[in-house]
Image (cartoon, rainbow, N blue to C red):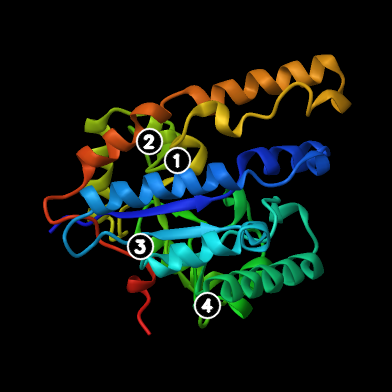
Amino acid sequence: MTRLFLSVDFEDFAHDLKRLLGVWETGPLRVEELWQSFETIDGFLRSHGGSTSCAATFFCTGVVARDAPDLVAEIAKRGHEVACHYYFHDSMDLQSAETIDRMLGQARQALEEAGNTPVRGFRAPRFRLNRATPEQYRLIERHFDYDCSSFFASAQECDRFSREMGLTTLRILPLFMTPLAVKGPMVRLGGSYLKFMTSDLAGKLIERSEQAGIAPQVYLHPYEIVEPQSFMVSMDELAALGSAKAAYWVLRQSQWLNFGGARLLRKVEGLIPAGGLAGRLDQLVGE
């Protein structure tokens, strides 16, 4: 029987972009917009997720728990899994081991206190980890039961990587990646790739993922769910960059925020198996 998991990288696009560009202290989190996106996703799951599988996994950043603890509490209250998306939405592959260990610990504590629930899973921002050495995976292993930051073409490839990293307790729950054709470009099941690909192609990738032994999942972001302008960072907020760079980043945001989001939930609806969604990712790990 076909399965499909849904996860959400629950982050504030505007805050994270401003932090990336060095102007992140120009305003608070857009909590109202995060609430709106959560209510929309939760409503979608209750309408289309299936009679027994309307829960999903929300990978929340620690700053969301810090500034909107009642929102994280509500996510947990409604039966969804609260997982960790680091503290800030920073690229971990560029950070020291000391910083990563501290941020992982702070994020997990903030999320567990806000949600009043154990936090077992982790996904790295932008899926960026240093995969050349085991150091960052072992830091994740210190804090979490599973990691959902890596793409593989088969379960065997994932298992081999886990052994090479020397992991003993951390379970890697991979996302599926495959070439479209022999020597063709690699595509991922979820995220921006899902916005670009046709529903037929996405359905085929779900089938190929199961055949490869990888539990199929697609992932969403809050900025793909609400009105695109809700998470837009304005020219005024970017003024410190200078007019040329500010204009460039407004254009880049338009590309990210406007393309495909309005149709995304309808596309996901068409991919849901007859029996509904498979539920929370922690179900794949067990107790």
Q: Position of residue 59 (x, y in %)?
A: 51, 59
Pointer 1 local density, CA inside 10 Å: few below 14, some 14–19, many at least 20: some
Residue position marked by numbered label 1 in the rendering: 191
Local secondary structure at mark 1: helix
Q: Position of residue 218 (x, y in %)?
A: 36, 48
| 156 left or right of 116 in image | left
Local secondary structure at mark 2: helix
| 152 left or right of 119 in image | left
In the rendered view of the protein, which quadrant contains the C terminus?
bottom left
In the rendered view of the protein, which quadrant contains the N terminus?
bottom left
Q: What is the distance, in whole Å, between disc 4 and disc 3 at their CAs?
A: 33 Å
Precedes in sequence: disc 4 or disc 3: 4
Asked if residue 204 can be seen in this view, the reply is no
Residue at 39%, 31% in the rendered image:
195
Pointer 3 local density, CA inside 10 Å: few below 14, some 14–19, many at least 20: many
Q: What amino acid does circle 1 point to?
A: Gly
| Residue 14: quarter of image | top right
Residue position marked by numbered label 2 in the rendering: 194
Residue at 56%, 44% in the rendered image:
32
Precedes in sequence: disc 4 or disc 2: 4
Q: What is the distance, in whole Å, between disc 2 and disc 1 at their CAs?
A: 5 Å
Comparing marks 4 and 2, which lies closer to the viewer? 4
Task: Find out whether the residues at labels 2 and 1 contact each other: C-beta distance under 8 Å.
Answer: yes
Q: What amino acid does circle 4 point to?
A: Asn
Q: Which mark is residue 155?
A: 3
Q: Which mark is residue 116?
A: 4
Q: What is the distance, in whole Å, between disc 1 and disc 4 at their CAs?
A: 29 Å
Asked if residue 7 can be seen in this view, the reply is yes
